[in-house]
Image (cartoon, helix red, strand yellow):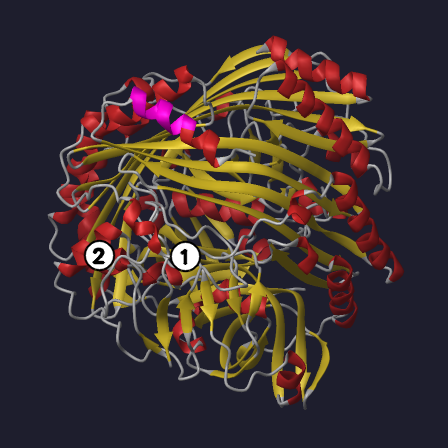
Amino acid sequence: MQEIAEWALSTAALRGASYADTRIGDERSRALATKNGKIASASDAESQGIGVRVIAEGAWGFAASDNLSREAVEATAAKAVAIAKASARVKQHDIQLAPEKPATADWTSPFKIDPFATSVEQNLDLLLKIDSELRSVAGVTLAETNMNFRRDEQWFLSSEGASIHQTKYTTGVGYTAYAFAGSEIQKRSYPNSYGGQWQNKGYELVEELKLVENARRVGEEAVALLKAERCPEGVFTIILDGSQLGLQIHESVGHPIELDRVLGMEANFAGTSFLTVDKLRNLRYGSELVNIVADARQEHGPGLGTFGFDDEGVPAQCTPIISNGLFTGYLSSRETAYTIGANRSGGTLRAEGWNRLPIIRMTNISILPGVHPLTREQLIAGTDSGIYMETNRSWSIDDKRYNFQFGCEAGWEIKNGNRTRMLKNPSYSGITTEFWNSLDAICSRDQWVLWGTPHCGKGQPQQVMGTGHGAAPARFRNIKVGSAYKGN
Amino acid sequence: MLTKDQAGEIFDRIRKHSTAEEVEVLFYGGKSALTRFANNTIHQNVAEENYGVSVRTAFGGRTARATTNKFDNESLKRVVQATEALAKVQQPDRDLLSMPDAGTLTMQGPPSRHFDQTAAITAEQRADSVSKIVGIATKHKLTTAGIFSTSESVEGIFNSRGLSDWHTQTSSEVSITMLAGNSSGWQKANSPDIRNLDPQALAEIAAKKAIESANPKEISPGKHTVILEPAAVLDMAGFMFFDFGGLAILDQRSFLNNRVGTKLFGENINISDDVAHPLQSGAPFDGEGVRRRRVPLVENGVVKRLVYARATAEKMKNSEYKDKVGIIEPTGHGFPIPNEMGEAPMNIVFAPPKEPKSIDQMIASTERGVLVTRLWYIREVDPYEKILTGMTRDGTFYVEDGKVRHGIRNFRFNESLIHMLSHVEEMGTPVRASGEESFDMVVPAMKVREFNFTEVTKF
């Protein structure tokens, strides 16, 4: 692969590129799914190819091909340079990159059990066993399970001398029970909605999650929601479980801190951000208890945003994003770091695959747990009145990331420190900074989980990326609840 | 571009590697390029060529799929072995049908959707067009961002029962945002034939919206009359069509559970799925190679029919719902097997109203209302009442006494799609619309009363 990459870099230089990098990718995935006692999906996929990114005449060009023959690789590199020269027809200034020492490295995400070496038959048996448990509950009308594996191997070489080989394993697994009756469809999912839990792990993730043990409860809760009372509308104290808080971080912290959005580069599609550069180290983003980092390093955990190097060869880093409530950092690339006068990229440029241009993506955007021991049960016990909400059902936020609304699968009323009756259709909404400033308690490290969001969309052509979000249950005061159903 | 003859040769090699009772191969891929601009600069500019084969094998009720983008013998052998290994460990499913034969190809397909003029567009031509868009932004003292993309693609299917079908298509798309200090405007269009696009005209409209919505005022949320431009209608309506598949009813996950045959929408709502419509695009066959039929989905507000993959139609005929869902037959709307979703109509066409109104006419007939250019980040809040939430974006205006008065801060809505399509007062002539939340459709602009805005944001 090194030789193939060199073909591309040599051609780019000969054609006039002042900078070039190339990524050769070898991607493999498996998707297994069941539905109501039958195999719904069993598929494997592999993809291999090369992407070449260049700067020529001060502008960017990128070309990709599935053909790794010398002739095709050289043609692809030449096309990237020609495209860059076309870009140069419409530019305000030449592209400049923040400096980065070229690295030579080999990195593999740690795993205990190679998921592709496990028995498909046993994997399907496990999913069907879960399916059977879910459907053993009277009233469950649809049971769905899924198990997904990925192996992404990549060779990155640059004209500056970087040579990085990385291999990443990803596992995802989860299930959902649906209950339809009268004029209502309710659902409960485990360990999370929209595909379950995903991490950079091997098959050991599947073994850790107590999937079968939780299935009956999940089915029963789906059916119970049909008879539960609707979540009231008003202003309440709310407690969010870790998975919902993870998505709250994703939408109202992770996206607005993307420096490409801040600088207007995503204005046509994903949008911009309220976090203009004058707000750095000036904006009180949240309460004193809010400490959020962007951490791609292995020591943060096996998140979907964990890697050795990003896709322009910058090593994984930890960037403080919110420090004791103060806004302190962006997600950046070499180009955007240079634009705002930073010394170095934060190392967050990533591509969906070999055929996509890397763009700024979240790594693991995690809220740090509380310092003092506090379990979810103790947090509820310390709350006089409020609503506990669990597992995301819907999410939406404006294109500057101010106004959001989330719906959850299930809620429970809290009265005098006790979790009491179940509530259906809980939702809450607010303005990002007002919400984070209302956080007054967060559970401790033993309650903290590094959740995976496997399907974050961004860019044109759109790219799907996995991101990580460490979170523990937390409490927020004076939150608007129930407006999702207001007027309906 | 990969040709049908080349694909046929690859299919023959795949068959030789397989021990399965039946083999099906889907071909996909092509050439695509996208020029992206922001801050009046081309900041991303990409091109790709990639083709793949997706192989399905079947052994007596057991089936699986494997995909690769490598066509050498070793890779093809590996992909066949992968699909066979996945299939063989399964318990047989008695609902799995044999693959269809060539007899499904008797219906005539739509006219060609491949245009040489689109396929021939170069990076230099895209850059020149972007330069003109930037020129319009500069003229109006605005900043622009957007895309100009073109592509040429193939989609094909071969199976061991003799079925083979092939579709080539081109696509071109322009999306333009114009940004002022505290306002913005947007326009987007796409077509298989690039001669149908007028990027400069779109840029002028987007610029006008940005200028006229400057210094937006805040008005109270609540139930307002809205005039939804076609892109806004598209992105809302797109959330209901996956519920029009037969399997969605069998799974009891559809908002049409117990509602097929009932009057769910207003008398003026007529919707069909029609791949052959002149403003539509896409292949004339489904994931099994069955030719797509025109299906009337909604007539005068009544939900008339669902679409079906072959296996779903068989299941429905034997189900407890068989007498409640209208005509049951394979319609050519199935996704590649195996899949969890079954089928969906993907070539939606809204019928024109008896008396189409232009957006200007809708504004002129409005005492007080809101003109919406585009909606954003739409998600389903309630799956049975089809309540959707989302935001307005890039050009939201207050209308009073028949005139657009000023820009307003963007709203969050929580609106039932059933309610919305039951309160349509006026409609435009349907056009091919393109948004960000849904696949492209042929939809009209709509004037809707009592649209439910619940909150307002800060810009």
Identified by mark 2, the residue type is: Ala
Image disc number at residue B384? none
Q: Residue B217 magenta-drawn?
A: no
- The residue singled out by tag 1 in the image is B108
Residue drawn where x is 74% and y is 35% of the image: A336
The magenta stretch spans which residues?
B9-17
Q: Chain of mark 1?
A: B
The answer to whether residue B9 is seen in the rendering is yes
Quadrant position of residue A45: top left
SS assignment for the magenta stretch, majority: helix
A69, A234: nearer the viewer: A69
Disc 2 packing (10 Å; few <14; some 14–19; many ≥20): many
- The residue singled out by tag 2 in the image is B313
Q: From the top left corner, tell me how far across and down residue A212 is, in percent.
A: 18, 36
**As displayed, is residue A66 above or below residue A392?**
above
Q: Do labels 2 and 1 touch, CB within 8 Å?
A: no
User: Which element carries disc 2, helix, strand or loop?
Assistant: helix
The answer to whether residue A460 is seen in the rendering is no
**As displayed, is residue A351 above or below residue B426?**
above
Q: Most extreme residue toward the right, as rendered? A: B139
Q: Residue B13 magenta-drawn?
A: yes
Mark 2 or mark 1: which comes first in sequence?
1
